[in-house]
């Protein structure tokens, strides 16, 4: 049941393993666009500094896109990347949005193959660790003209990571951002460009100052519809008396279509739940928590996997979700996804791509 609660406790980092993005591995894969019609073959080299002209276009005008995906060590010892083709497709959509050349899927996959083959040995068989892969592309022209670059560089780097929020899965508290917006119609909220992230830092600082772990974004027009949480998609577990619905905000053009979100919509069916995509207002979230219809909320993404949300704070008002602890549907969905990652649950759709 929902209840009014006092201010959430300040977030603490319970982490003994590697932090997110802190331990970069030994190699880097790199490719260059020839300025006209093709990419060079991605080549593997040592991880090293870049030499950039101070007038590099990408640095000034934000012609920078990136991706985030993971490779996991399966129970049989092999390494496999999770749905890399989907990430390649999103990288292509991001490129189109920012007037950049698309990296063909084969080159994206070959870069991943090379880096994971070289650095995968750094990933232990600790199932809570994974190899996070970060593809990046930026405009390289030496020019301060306000125009798309002609030259581009693609890089792929990686790091070993434990849990995004620490070693254990604890429910997070969220702060509804009333002062800032992440995305707006006609903008870039549905792609993964660097420029989407720095403007979110102020809101995250406000959330932390208010004692919360993360920000919840509302739509920028009506400031009514719940969109995402930080850099993650959101799900609500609702019992409508007959069935358990696993509901996520619909893709209105201002949300990032998460690969994890898409995967969980499929996995929910395997658990006998009904997946739904619909608009959810903040008021509805609060009221349905209050009357018990929404019993769980969780965030999902490559980094966070599936993370329960325990408490929401909107200005001076706050409410618990369920009893504030992780609910059973959240737990089962995370378990199933993690088992697919580690080759412990069937992978009928071929989501795991083995690295040879
Ligand atoms: C804004 C935003 N939403 C959602 C996600 C989750 O997407 P995915 O599940 O593909 O990692 C991410 C991470 O890429 C993100 O940056």
Image (tube, rainbow, N blue to C red):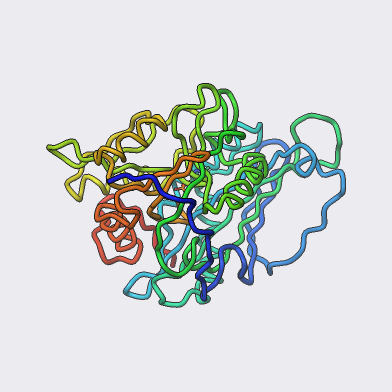
Task: Report the residue that reaches farthest toward the left.
Answer: 242
Quadrant hosting residue 115: bottom right
126 vs 291, nearest the viewer: 291
Q: Residue at x 25, y 62 (%)?
A: 345
Q: Say whether residue 282 is visible.
A: yes
Instruction: Report whether 302 appears left or right of 34.
Output: left
Q: Residue at x 58, y 43 (%)?
A: 103
Against 294, residue 77 (above or below) is below
Residue 19: x and y in percent read: 56, 67
Quadrant hosting residue 145: top right
Instruction: Report whether 207 appears left or right of 4.
Output: right
Q: Residue at x 24, y 39 (%)?
A: 293
Residue 139: x and y in percent read: 73, 42
Name the quarter where the C terminus is drawn: bottom left
Q: Residue at x 53, y 39 (%)?
A: 315
Instruction: Report whether 176 appears left or right of 75.
Output: right
46 vs 199, nearest the viewer: 199
């Amino acid at each position: 049941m929902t209840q009014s609660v006092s201010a959430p406790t300040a977030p603490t980092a319970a982490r003994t393993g590697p932090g997110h993005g802190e331990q970069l591995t030994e190699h880097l894969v790199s490719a260059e666009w020839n300025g006209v019609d093709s990419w060079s073959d991605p080549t593997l080299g040592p991880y090293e500094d870049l030499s950039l002209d101070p007038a590099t276009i990408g640095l000034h005008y934000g012609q920078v896109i990136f991706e985030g995906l993971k490779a996991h060590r399966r129970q049989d010892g092999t390494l496999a990347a999770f749905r890399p083709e989907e990430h390649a497709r999103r990288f292509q959509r991001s490129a189109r949005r920012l007037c950049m050349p698309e990296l063909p899927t084969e080159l994206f996959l070959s870069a991943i193959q090379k880096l994971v083959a070289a650095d995968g040995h750094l990933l232990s068989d600790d199932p809570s660790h994974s190899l996070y892969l970060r593809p990046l592309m930026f405009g390289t022209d030496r020019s301060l003209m306000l125009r798309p670059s002609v030259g581009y560089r693609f890089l792929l780097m990686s790091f070993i990571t434990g849990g995004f929020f620490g070693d254990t899965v604890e429910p997070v508290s969220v702060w509804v951002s009333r002062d800032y917006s992440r995305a707006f119609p006609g903008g870039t909220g549905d792609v993964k460009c660097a420029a989407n992230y720095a403007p979110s830092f102020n809101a995250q600082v406000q959330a932390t100052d208010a004692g919360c772990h993360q920000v919840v974004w509302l739509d920028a027009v009506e400031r009514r519809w719940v969109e995402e949480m930080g850099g993650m998609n959101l799900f609500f577990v609702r019992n409508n008396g007959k069935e358990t619905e696993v509901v996520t905000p619909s893709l209105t053009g201002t949300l990032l279509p998460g690969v994890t979100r898409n995967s969980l919509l499929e996995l929910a069916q395997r658990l006998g739940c009904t997946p739904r995509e619909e608009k959810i207002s903040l008021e509805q979230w609060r009221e349905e928590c209050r009357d018990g219809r929404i019993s769980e909320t969780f965030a999902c993404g490559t980094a966070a996997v599936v993370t329960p949300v325990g408490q929401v704070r909107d200005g001076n008002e706050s409410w618990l979700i369920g009893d504030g602890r992780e609910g059973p549907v959240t737990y089962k969905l995370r378990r199933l996804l993690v088992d697919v990652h580690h080759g412990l649950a069937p992978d009928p759709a071929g989501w795991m791509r083995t690295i040879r």
